[in-house]
Image: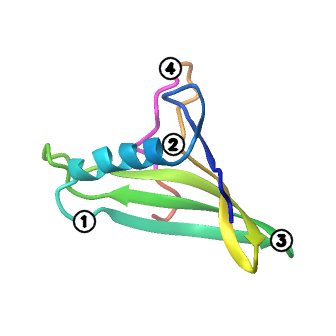
């Protein structure tokens, strides 16, 4: 069993141990949505060995927000897993939004994969 999981937040600029704080952030985020959150993975690729695996995908997140906004953004996800006691456990996950490389460093939330 993985007793410790790290998450690295671009907002915090340092690593944190996952757990109560991570849960608290999610509990604050979920109520900003009005109804279900649309979540659609795409282009999932899995590479697995006997005890270690990783997967990558593009995921669309959207829905209605409580402020009336209806975002639909694509994020990149990489998850690393370890097989422990016969079960796969997420050891590391990275979620990111692409950004414009024009010097502005603004998140490119208006992009979508070809054919989407």
Would residue 37 be found to the left or right of residue 17 on screen?
left
Disc nearer the start of the sequence (4/3): 3
Determine whether the residue tagged by mark 1 lies in a helix, strand or loop. loop
Q: Give left or right: position of 104 versus 87.
A: left
Of the two numbered discs 2 and 4 on the same chain, state the one appearing first in sequence: 2
**Which range is magenta?**
104-111
Q: Report the front residue among 52 and 86.
A: 86
Instruction: Kindly indicate whether the residue at mark 3 contacts the one at mark 4 (C-beta within 8 angstroms).
Output: no
Name the dominant secondary structure of the magenta segment: loop
Task: Find disc 2 in the rendering and name its residue.
Answer: 97
Q: Position of residue 25 (x, y in %)?
A: 38, 43
Label 2 and label 1: CA atoms lie apart by: 21 Å
Residues at badges 2 and 3 in contact (C-beta under 8 Å)?
A: no
Front of the two marks 4 and 3: 3
The dot on residue 36 is 1
Q: Quadrant of the C terminus?
A: bottom left
Distance between the alpha carbons at the discs numbered 2 and 4: 14 Å
The secondary element bearing badge 2 is classed as loop
The residue nearer to you, when weighing 15 against 103, is 15
The residue that disc 3 covers is 51
Who comes first in sequence, dot 2 or dot 1?
A: 1
Q: Nearer the viewer, mark 1 or mark 4?
A: 1
Q: Is residue 30 above or below residue 46?
A: above
Image coords of residue 67 (percent x, y): 14, 43
For marks 1 and 4, the one nearer the N-term is 1
Q: Is residue 84 left or right of residue 109?
A: right
The image quarter in which residue 48 lies = bottom right
State the residue at coordinates (57%, 25%): 13
- Residue 33 sits above or below residue 47 on the image: above
* Mark 2 → mark 3, Cα distance in angstroms: 29 Å
Residue receiving disc 4: 104
Disc nearer the start of the sequence (2/3):
3
């Amino acid at each position: 069993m993985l007793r410790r999981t790290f998450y690295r937040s671009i907002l915090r600029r340092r690593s944190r141990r996952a757990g109560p704080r991570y849960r608290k952030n999610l509990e604050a985020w979920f109520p900003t949505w009005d109804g279900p959150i649309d979540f659609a993975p795409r282009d999932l690729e899995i590479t697995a060995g006997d005890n270690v695996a990783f997967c990558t995908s593009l995921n669309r997140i959207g829905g209605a927000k409580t402020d009336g906004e209806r975002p639909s953004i694509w994020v990149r996800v990489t998850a690393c897993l370890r097989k422990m006691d016969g079960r796969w456990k997420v050891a590391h996950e990275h979620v990111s939004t692409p950004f414009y490389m024009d010097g502005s460093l603004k998140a490119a939330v208006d992009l979508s994969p070809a054919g989407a």
